[in-house]
Image: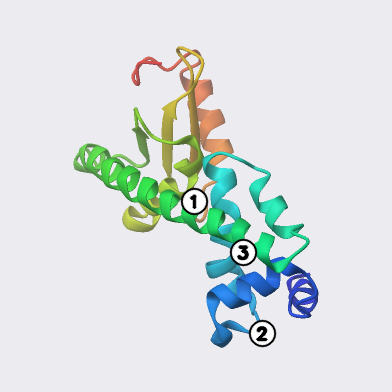
Amino acid sequence: MVSQGLTLINRMDAACWRAMAQRLGQDSVPFNAETLAFQMGPRINARSRLDDPYAALHFMLAESDAIANRQLDVLDDDNQSRKAIEADMAQEARALAAVELAADASALIVLLEDGHPGVQGIVASRLVQAYGRPALVLTRAAQPGMLTGSGRSIDGLHLRDALQRAYELAPGPCHALGA
């Protein structure tokens, strides 16, 4: 599927791919899976993580190179914002995880009071990479008393099963996090 998609993208029929090629430089063409995953994907996905899920669609459907370039400018700006938010949240999450690590917790659960919900999964992945333990990153939801979250696990542990088991052992709302 990736191979076929890259074949279509590398035809450069669409304005969005021409704009991306111009932005990334001629060394990036023809696009490959690495370029797609680490250069194109984060740019295309950043806006939907932060705000507008349609920005990437507008970029991909741009009818001219000029419009595609303007849309890509927006996506690039959003990707830079996402990186800054991620860095701040990851720093706070590592500080909060230090307490759990000192207690030799088998999983890390952090509540980032002012965290952005669109970046929770990335931060959870960073914790798993850093500490080799399953991680849940939670932030306050718009509804009072509610949290949103994203988790990442390690090989051999299905996170859904672990959460189900935790609920079976202690059903009801979680009061430890102030929820």
Q: Does residue 77 appear left or right of residue 88 in this picture?
A: right
The amino acid type, in three-letter code, at marker 2 is Pro
Give the mark, 1 or 2, whose residue is nearer the N terminus: 2
Which residue is rendered at x = 35% and y = 34% of the image? Answer: 110
Mark 1 vs mark 2: in front: 1
* Of 122 and 68, the residue lying toward us: 68
Q: Please determine whether, in this image, residue 68 is positioned above or below residue 13.
A: above
The residue wearing badge 2 is 30
Which residue is rendered at x = 74% and y = 79% of the image? Answer: 10
Q: Does residue 116 appear left or right of residue 158 in this picture?
A: left
Based on the displayed image, in which of its 4 quarters is residue 51 positioned?
top right
The amino acid type, in three-letter code, at marker 1 is Asp
* Of 134 and 142, the residue lying toward us: 142
Residue 112 x %, y %: 35, 32
Tag of residue 78? 1
Based on the displayed image, in which of its 4 quarters is residue 129 positioned?
bottom left
Tag of residue 66? none
Give the mark, 3 or 2, whose residue is nearer the N terminus: 2
Mark 1 neighbour class, 10 Å CA radius: few under 14, some 14 to 19, many 20 or more: many
Image quarter of the N terminus: bottom right
Residue 161 x %, y %: 57, 37
Q: Please determine whether, in this image, residue 118 is positioned above or below residue 14.
A: above
The residue wearing badge 3 is 69
The amino acid type, in three-letter code, at marker 3 is Asn
Q: Does residue 50 appear left or right of residue 21 in this picture?
A: left
* Of 164 and 16, the residue lying toward us: 16
Image quarter of the C terminus: top left
Disc 3 from disc 1: Cα separation: 14 Å
Residue 72 x %, y %: 59, 60
